[in-house]
Image: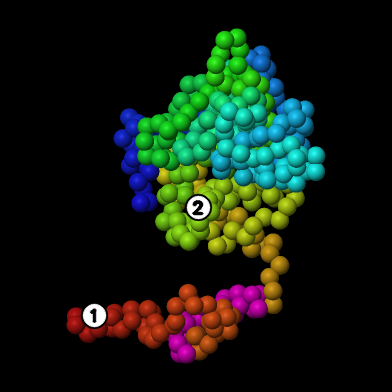
Amino acid sequence: MVGSNIYTASKHFIDVERAQRKAKQLRWEVLNNLHSLILQFERSFTERGGKIRFATDSVEARQQIRQILLDRSAYNVSVSRSPHLEEFDLQELGKHQDLKHSIAFCPPGEEVEVGISAADFLVAEQGLVAISDEASNAVQISMGVKANIVLAPIDKLLPNIDDLFDFWSLMASFGHGKQEQNHQTILSGPRRGKDNEGPAELYLILIDNGRAEMIQNADWEILYCINCQACRKSSILHQNRHSNVQLPYRTPVEQLLENKLAEYNGRRPRDMKGYPSHDIAPMNCPVQINLNQLIEDMRRDQQATANLGFRERWMWKGWHWYTSSRSRMNSSPMIKNMLSDFFFEGDQFLPAHSSPTFNQMWNQAAWEEEEMM
């Protein structure tokens, strides 16, 4: 139910709105000081024995993964079912000729050599990698393989571990309606000494994929997102739109982020005109992203740059002419239905016009009220 996120979260926080404002402010500070946080994290992470690599986009990230697998001659590779990995399109790895006979995507087990998962957050001060999931196998993969490759965008950084626990609480409350998620783990590096858990080798691939340019252009509010999935559960329209979709689908904020990154990477963004937005209130987001305004702005930009066809151009011109006159708006419903069928090509979801119009009913009611007085 719309509005249930903020109600549920209010039971887990003394002042949930203050926690939201604090989280949003922290995300702004992170993006505003991202360069120094990356350097701090790199220093702390490598001191703990981790190996970090940088990728400008998803193509380079897959190349980095491919090289790691080739160096290890890995045969069994387990990939997390995390939705955060969709951006990297790891299925493309199986198309490489040199990996076809040496790699198999399989569930975690004793024979798995390399695991691939996604990080929720990176803690800069301590050099930690935080992974959590509800139904995925990301935590199991991270703990039960010889080598673990973790993918993380640069905006996943947090200053210190106290901030991590605050954000994990917000994710659990807004996304799942409880105080903490089912599975959470913090990787402080590869196994050391007599440790029995954790990977023997830990690789982190830090990916940009257009985010740095977004930040430079102050187009960064969408990067506040912490992937809690709350916007999918808040939007009744979004749920109804995808009610018949069997495969996992992206949340409104993930769809918007995909389009933003496509713009900055020179790719054609998807059409956002069909995606709902107006029933997602900023208060239902743990970091108060104004998703309504962001989607409306993108729709407006797409409409301004769209190459409209002859029919659609004349449809909007005719619509402007027709609605600019009250006498035309009150014309015969038969004429209006004929025009609708022509321009919208018999769309079955478009309601038929009838008589009288609302304006005519309003005037009639006002006239009757005057007569009674």
The quadrant where residue 49 appears:
top right
Residue drawn at (33%, 81%) of the image? 361
Q: Which residue is found at the position 44% from the left and 53% from the top?
A: 235
The C terminus: image quadrant: bottom left
Which one is in front, 338 or 87? 87
**Residue for badge 1:** 369
**Quarter of the view holding residue 84:** top right
| Image mark for residue 292 | 2
Amino acid of disc 2: Asn
**Secondary structure mostly taken by the magenta-highlighted segment of the chain:** helix
Frontmost residue, 45 versus 23: 45
Q: Is residue 259 above or below residue 28?
A: below
Residue 321 colored magenta? Answer: yes
Left or right: 185 in relation to 180: right
- Tell me how far mark 1 sits from mark 2, CA to CA: 40 Å
Task: Name the residue located 77 percent from the left edge and 28 percent from the top edge.
Answer: 71
Residue 226: x, y in percent? 52, 37
